[in-house]
Image (spheres, rainbow, N blue to C red):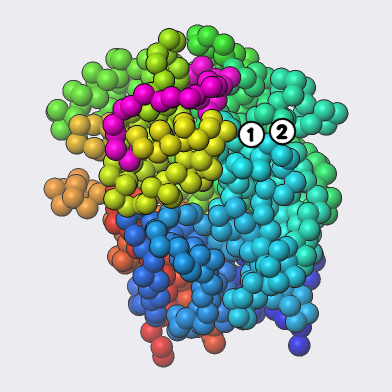
């Protein structure tokens, strides 16, 4: 009998309708976010009429959680086995009907310290008798035997490949990780990466590796080399010294066409680009690549010369829309500033009207903003676009007065208002609007579902180097670390953790290693020399300033950049709530054919405010939803109430909800085993000051 995964592949080549019947027959959830990034399940055993009867079927507790840890994984399920990751990035295989642990793989069984790592899913590949799971851990991709969890020795070096492969000598000691899963096309694993957001940073090139051997098969340069398309949009030689333009959010495969769609982020450094003047292709682009060769088929750039961290926040969604009486295969991309863009898959023709306009000019020395930017004119944005005086919080008179006072001190304007020294309000904020959970599309109704944040952030530029100042540990920290972790070392959790008392949580050797080599978004500083690394590590641990001797070069990680930022700062009132009026998060259903909203509701709330009668405020939310043929939209995502919700997909009416062990900042998976349908969600918490968790919980109807 042919394996289900192969049946699925054949049906994908024949078209969507065949896939629906194949997925319905198997009940599998074979790829993260669903086939085509649709977040759609054709299962209907759980439906509008019976969803209120849902009960917990099983719960797997990893016991891997620690303060600040998360699980963002959307697990895959094939042939009755669920594959997922834990907060410490163990890989686990569970019996999908019972939650029983079948095997576990730990890349660092002897690691004694708890180091936060992020993972949003795994990749499954099968051919003949071979079955493999691919997962990103640290700077590696591991290939694991799907039956045993043991590394496949034939893949790379003893079962893993180094993600620095093919990035050039300048990137070999810089941060490169795969926090979002890649996609498999035939015998290729196609992968994007996370790199540092400040310099020095590795380039965000997109690469394909042989699924059996790990050999590099092709590379698409997101920062073009001489002679390549787009090279002229950068300063000469930028490809050798500037990083970023990476596809960290994940990729989407159109297997029928042999196309992979790659959304990219901004070039490093995110907020001051005097060293990268120009439009900076292929940063902030959706790129359609030939999945076999890596050749560019088409691209569209959403932000020219990004200075606002306007990365494309999620993998795009394959959809079908009607235009002028015909069905068009399209790809939909959401953005941090709250828009939905649609393109024909074959040629990149925009299917939404948009305007090009003169963008505001910067007054920051050395910088040059792009003269033009673009925004769609429909559908309407799913997030508010500019903070105004009448939008400020009225939660209490004191909170309102504080917000008004700050409003008059900040630079506030429309989209693409440049960064400033006084502080520019970025709204929606650095996390969106749209975020990495992505959107869901219902092929039955054409409705497109997207959850959104509505948080204002403050972007303030500050000098990196004070001319003539003596070199000291505090000065090094200010120049290289305070942009993320703030001058007071308290950070902007959870993305940029507090460093206060970090010496009690990590040994000095580990802190030294992170300062030298970096990790996640953080660049490494080893190129500045041992005395600098030692001084920075000691200041991070103790907060005590001392002179630094023996520094022969300019002690900053970004020698060409005059300015950094004073931290990643949400605009909050004195009590820690958003400084703008609700909704602070929304859930939206948009008809992609008409461009009209079917429904829109506040999404999430703060339990302590609800207890005082302030309901339906919305809240920040991370993770996507899944829409089903049973008429439901399942989504957790909300930071503070720890809820998993089931909404009527047609009306937005809440039909069922339950409280999870921790907030479910992930996307659910929907599957069927032995004739029973399940909804499973990771409850990892750890965002917005909430407790961390380490469990997966599955729900199903009571047995008959």
Magenta stretch? 540-565
Residue position marked by numbered label 2 in the rendering: 223
Residue at disc 2, secondary structure: loop
Q: Are marks 1 and 2 in contact (CB under 8 Å)?
A: yes
Q: Is residue 301 visible?
A: no
Q: Residue 680 in the image: x percent, y percent? A: 45, 70
Vertical side of 497 occupied by 273: above or below: above
The magenta stretch spans residue 544: yes
Query: What residue is at 66 percent from the left and 51 percent from the top?
Result: 163
Residue 175: horizontal and vertical position, in percent?
57, 44
Mark with earlier residue (1, 2): 2
Badge 1 element: loop
Q: Is residue 700 visible?
A: yes
Residue at label 1? 243
> Residue at 80% across / 50% down in the picture?
218
**Would residue 663 be found to the left or right of residue 560 on screen?**
left
């Amino acid at each position: 009998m042919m394996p289900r995964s192969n049946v699925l592949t054949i049906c994908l080549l024949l078209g969507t309708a065949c896939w629906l019947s194949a997925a319905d027959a198997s009940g599998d959830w074979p790829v993260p976010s669903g086939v085509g990034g649709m977040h759609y399940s054709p299962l209907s055993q759980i439906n509008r009429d019976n969803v209120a009867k849902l009960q917990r079927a099983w719960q797997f507790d990893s016991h891997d959680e620690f303060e600040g840890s998360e699980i963002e994984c959307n697990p895959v399920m094939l042939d009755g086995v669920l594959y997922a990751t834990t907060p410490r990035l163990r890989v686990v295989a569970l019996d999908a009907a019972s939650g029983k642990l079948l095997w576990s793989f730990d890349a660092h069984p002897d690691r004694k310290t708890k180091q936060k790592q992020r993972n949003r899913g795994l990749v499954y590949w099968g051919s003949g008798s071979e079955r493999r799971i691919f997962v990103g851990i640290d700077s590696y991709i591991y290939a694991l035997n799907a039956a045993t969890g043991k590394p496949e020795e034939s893949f790379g070096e003893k079962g893993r490949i180094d993600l620095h492969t093919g990035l050039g000598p300048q990137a070999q000691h810089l941060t490169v990780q795969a926090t979002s899963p890649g996609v498999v096309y035939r015998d290729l694993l196609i992968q994007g990466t996370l790199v540092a957001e400040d310099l020095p940073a590795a380039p965000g090139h997109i690469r394909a590796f042989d699924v059996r051997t790990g050999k590099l098969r092709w590379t698409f340069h997101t920062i073009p080399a001489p002679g390549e398309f787009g090279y002229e949009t950068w300063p000469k030689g930028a490809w050798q010294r500037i990083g970023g333009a990476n596809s960290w959010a994940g990729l989407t495969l159109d297997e029928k066409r042999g196309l992979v769609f790659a959304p990219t982020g901004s070039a490093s450094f995110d907020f001051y680009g005097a060293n990268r003047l120009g439009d900076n292709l292929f940063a902030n682009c959706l790129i359609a690549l030939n999945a076999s060769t890596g050749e560019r088929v088409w691209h569209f750039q959403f932000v020219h010369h990004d200075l606002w961290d306007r990365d494309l926040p999620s993998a795009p969604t394959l959809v079908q829309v009607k235009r002028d009486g015909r069905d068009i295969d399209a790809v939909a991309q959401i953005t941090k500033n709250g828009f939905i863009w649609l393109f024909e898959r074959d040629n990149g023709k925009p299917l939404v009207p948009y305007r090009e306009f003169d963008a505001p000019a910067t007054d920051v020395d050395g910088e040059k903003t792009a003269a033009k930017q673009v925004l769609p004119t429909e559908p309407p944005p799913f997030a508010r676009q500019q903070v105004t005086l009448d939008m400020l919080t009225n939660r209490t008179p004191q909170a309102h007065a504080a917000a008004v006072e700050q409003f008059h001190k900040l630079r506030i304007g429309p989209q693409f208002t440049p960064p400033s020294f006084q502080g520019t309000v970025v709204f929606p904020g650095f996390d969106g609007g749209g975020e990495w959970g992505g959107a869901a599309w219902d092929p039955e109704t054409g409705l497109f579902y997207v959850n959104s944040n509505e948080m204002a952030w403050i972007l303030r530029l500050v000098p990196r180097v004070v001319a003539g100042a003596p070199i000291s540990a505090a000065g090094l920290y200010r120049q290289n670390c305070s942009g993320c972790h703030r001058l007071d070392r308290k950070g902007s959790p959870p993305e940029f953790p507090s460093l206060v008392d970090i010496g009690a949580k990590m040994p000095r050797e580990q802190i030294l290693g992170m300062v030298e080599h970096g990790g996640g978004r953080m660049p490494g500083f080893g190129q500045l020399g041992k005395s600098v690394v030692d001084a920075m590590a000691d200041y991070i641990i103790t907060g005590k300033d001392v002179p630094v001797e023996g520094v022969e070069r300019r002690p900053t990680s970004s020698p060409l950049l005059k300015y950094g930022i004073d931290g990643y700062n949400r605009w909050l009132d004195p009590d820690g709530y958003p400084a703008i009026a609700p909704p602070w998060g929304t859930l939206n259903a948009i008809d992609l054919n008409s461009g009209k909203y079917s429904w829109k509701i506040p999404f999430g709330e703060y339990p302590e405010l609800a207890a005082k009668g302030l309901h339906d405020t919305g809240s920040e939310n991370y993770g996507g939803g899944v829409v089903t043929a049973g008429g439901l939209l399942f989504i957790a995502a909300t930071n503070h109430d720890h809820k998993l919700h089931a909404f009527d997909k047609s009306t937005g009416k809440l039909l069922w909800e339950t409280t999870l062990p921790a907030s479910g900042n992930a996307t659910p998976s929907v599957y069927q085993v032995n004739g029973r349908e399940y909804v499973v969600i990771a409850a990892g918490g750890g965002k917005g000051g909430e407790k961390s968790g380490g469990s997966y919980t599955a729900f199903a109807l009571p047995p008959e």
